[in-house]
Image (cartoon, helix red, strand yellow):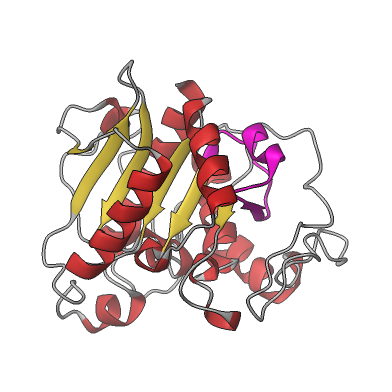
Amino acid sequence: MTPSVPRAIALAGLGLAGLWVGATASRVPEAGQGPDGRSAHAGLRGGGAMVQPSSRPPPGWEFYFTRAVYSGLRRGYFESWRVDYPKADRQFLIGLRRLTNISAYELENPMRLDDPDLRRFPFLYALEVGYMSLSQAEVVGLREYLLAGGFLLIDDFWGTLEWENFESEMKRVLPGYAIVDLPADHPLLSAFYEINEITQVPNVRQGMMGGRTWERDGYQPALRGILDEKGRLMVAINWNTDLGDAWEWAENPYYPLRFSNYAYQLGINSIVYAMSH
C-alpha cells in the first residue's frame, strides 16, 4: 500500500502535474457537462430547483462518485449540497484512479435522495449537512438506500448548532439507530490505508494561512458512525473537518500536504469499505 498521497497527487512523483494542468485547461468539461461537452445533468438547476437529472452517467464503470442532492436551508447558488462541486469530485477521482485499481468514472454523479436509481450506487457523499432540511420523500429514499446496503460519507459541517441540525435529520432517516464514535480499530480506518490519527482538515483559506484549523466552536474533529444490526457501517460522519476542500485544492502548492494526504486516504478507505461491505 502507498504510505501517503504525494503532492498534486502531486506536483512530482506520480506524474500527475501535467494531468492536473490538462484538467483545468481543456481535458475536463465545464461543470455539468459530459465528456462530449453536452449537458450530463441538465435537470439540476440553480434557484432552489432540484429536478430529475435528464441523463445518467455512461454504464461500464466499477465506481461512480455519487454526490447527494438534498433539500436544505440555503437556496439558489448557495444550495448546501453543491459546495466544492464539481471540482472536488473530479480532483478526488483523479487521485482515486491513480492510486487504486478501481475502475472509476472520471466525472461527477449528482443524485437526488428520492431517486429510485440511487440504489445503483453503493457510495454516497454529502456535505454541509448542518443546513440539511429533508423532505419526507428524501427521508424515505435515504432510509431505504442505507438499509438496502448503501454507504453515506458525511463531510464539512462544524460546531454544535450544525451538529444538532444534522442529528435531528438523521433521527428522521434512521429512527432508533444510535450515532457512535468509531474506535481506532474500525475496519474503515484500514480498508486501504492504515490511518492512525483523526486529523482536522481546515478550509482552504485557513489551511494556506497556517493558523487555526477549526470553525465556529468545532475545535475537535470527530469520526462517528451509524451501524446496522449486523455491525455494518451505514453512515460515516466527519464532523469539524473539511475533506472536500483538501480534495479541491490538492494541486495548490500552498495547501499543506498533510491535510490532502489525510483527506485522500480517508476518502479512498471509505470507497473501498463501501464497495466491500
Task: Please say if 141 is above or below 36.
Answer: above
Task: Please say if 247 is above or below 171.
Answer: below
Q: Nearer the viewer, residue 147 or 186?
A: 147
What residue lies at 17% left-to-right and 27% top-to-bottom?
Answer: 185
What residue lies at 22% left-to-right and 46% top-to-bottom?
Answer: 223
Residue 95 in percent (x, y) is at 51, 50
Q: Is residue 244 magenta?
A: no
Q: Nearer the viewer, residue 231 or 243?
A: 231
Residue 154 in percent (x, y) is at 38, 51
Q: Is residue 118 magenta?
A: yes
Q: Nearer the viewer, residue 2 or 238?
A: 238
Task: Please say if 171 is above or below 12.
Answer: above
From this viewpoint, is residue 83 visible?
yes
Residue 19 in percent (x, y) is at 62, 61
Q: Nearer the viewer, residue 9 or 36?
A: 36
Quarter of the image that includes the N terminus: top left
Part of the protein shown in magenta? 103-123
Residue 124 in percent (x, y) is at 52, 44
